[in-house]
Amino acid sequence: MLGERFSEVLDAARAGEEQAFALLYRDLNANLLRYFFAHAPSEAEDLASEAWLAAARGLRSFEGDERAFRAWLFTIAHRKVVQHWRDAARHPAQPAPQEVFDAVLDASETERQALDASDAAAAARALAAALSPDQAQVVLLRVLGGLTVEEVAAAMGKRPGTVRVLQHRALRRLAGKFSLEGVTR
Amino acid sequence: MTPERDLQDEMHRWPIDDGTAERLLAGRIDPADAPPGYSQVARLVQAAHAPALPGELCLEDEVVRKVAAVARATRPLTKEIPMRKKLLPFKVATAAVVGALGFATAAAAVGVDLASHKSPSSHAVVQFSSSSQPKSGTRAGGGTASPNNVQSGSAAAKTTPAGPATGMTRGHATFGLCTAFLAIYRTGSGSASKALTSTAFKALVSALGTATPSGTAAKCQTIVSTTRPGTETAAVSGTPPSSHPSATTHPSATTHPSATTHPSATTHPSATSHMPPAVRMTAHPAATGHPGA
């Protein structure tokens, strides 16, 4: 968190000062990257870069405090993910060999890695893998972006009540899934 | 019991209130203190909240450089001017043009001669009534003869609609033709007498209602000496025959003190090109006896 320095940093970033962007990047990029890694592991770096570029283009139109900036950046990230899914649906990639697919994207393996190694990105990936896309969006925007229910609703184009329902169902689903795995282990 | 139904039954076992859910998602619940069934979830959430690792910032230099360049290239926001405001000057200009054209049209309809007021030195047009001069549009002294309203006598000075009247209305044209006529007439050569029979001078002779070149010269001398180009004040002494288009100018021009010495009278192209300076404004012997001279 930049705290009271945020407004100066934002002004400097608007003027195109690299130092200001470096501060913002160090503060927010880790969670941004985890968010993208949870949704699209192979494209996470590219999507994060695109989100930063989009933020730079729209920075002059942004108004608000640090919290609002964080919510704004993750709203951009959410749209990038949705666009990525649409593009992937329109232009499906060549299917990878099964063994590669299993090694890279096996959810249970990722969960085990997350639980064992506590790797942040793997933890985010584990949360998303256990949920439906909408539930995953709600949980990750709340956990990684720090958005409120209302901010998530605005970002996703849903009503706050709908977001709360999605959030409760997601948490119960996570509890049920990981408790069962813990028992079965 | 299938695993799915078993899972759903398990899900119903872990109710969670809003406050706990908020704290859980914010990473503020320790896995050991989490509600039953949520310890692993709390652990995952806390893991996701971990500080940035070096590998997550490895592209910082590259990304920051690009992003800063984009921010610098982005133009500052300017207050967008509504399209209707952008078009306002054009609308005003269009309205002004339309208004001016409408005024000119209306003025033309009622017979006001705007051109004579606007441009004193412009070439005027010899106008003939359609009834007395069927060949309207003939070239007169190099100018265009166009059908138009014709004013005569004192009415010529007025700007009231005259309708299809007779005679010349433009002092400029009369002055120019007369000056040219006099210049050629004074040369007295054979070619001059031929030139005086040209179409332009025929129109002049016809307009003045004279039968001989000397008579035309006399009347022209009167006009030249009393007319100041730029005004419609040319006095013609003697009333032309009613059957002829009459050369009429404003009577007040005869008393204009500068009429005979107006510089433009001596510099009219049609006059200076043919007339020696010494004889420009001198009265022709044939014209001195004319009542109007």
Image (cartoon, coloured by chain):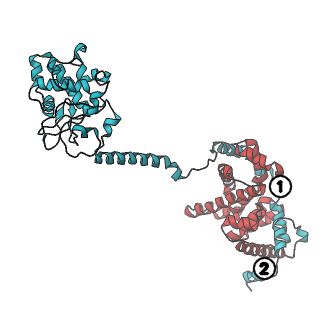
Chain colours: A red, B cyan
Mark earlier in primary sequence (2, 1) = 2
Horizontal side of B206 relative to A74 (left or right) equals: left
Q: Relative to B265, is B14 above or below?
A: below
- Left or right: residue A162 versus residue B216 is right
**Residue A97: x %, y % from top left:** 63, 62
Q: Do labels 2 and 1 share a chain?
A: yes
- Residue A5 location (% of width, % of height): 81, 48
User: Mark 2: which amino acid?
Assistant: Met
Which residue matches tag 1?
Answer: B51
Q: Is residue A117 visible?
A: yes
Q: Where is residue B139 in the image (x, y as percent from the top left)?
A: 18, 33
Which chain hosts label 2?
Answer: B
Circle 2 residue: B11
**Which sits in the foreground, A117 or A150?**
A150
Q: In the rendered structure, which amino acid carries the disc numbered 1?
A: Pro
Give whichever of B139, B28 is nearer the camera: B139
> In the picture, residue B233 is in which quadrant?
top left
Q: Which mark is residue A23?
A: none
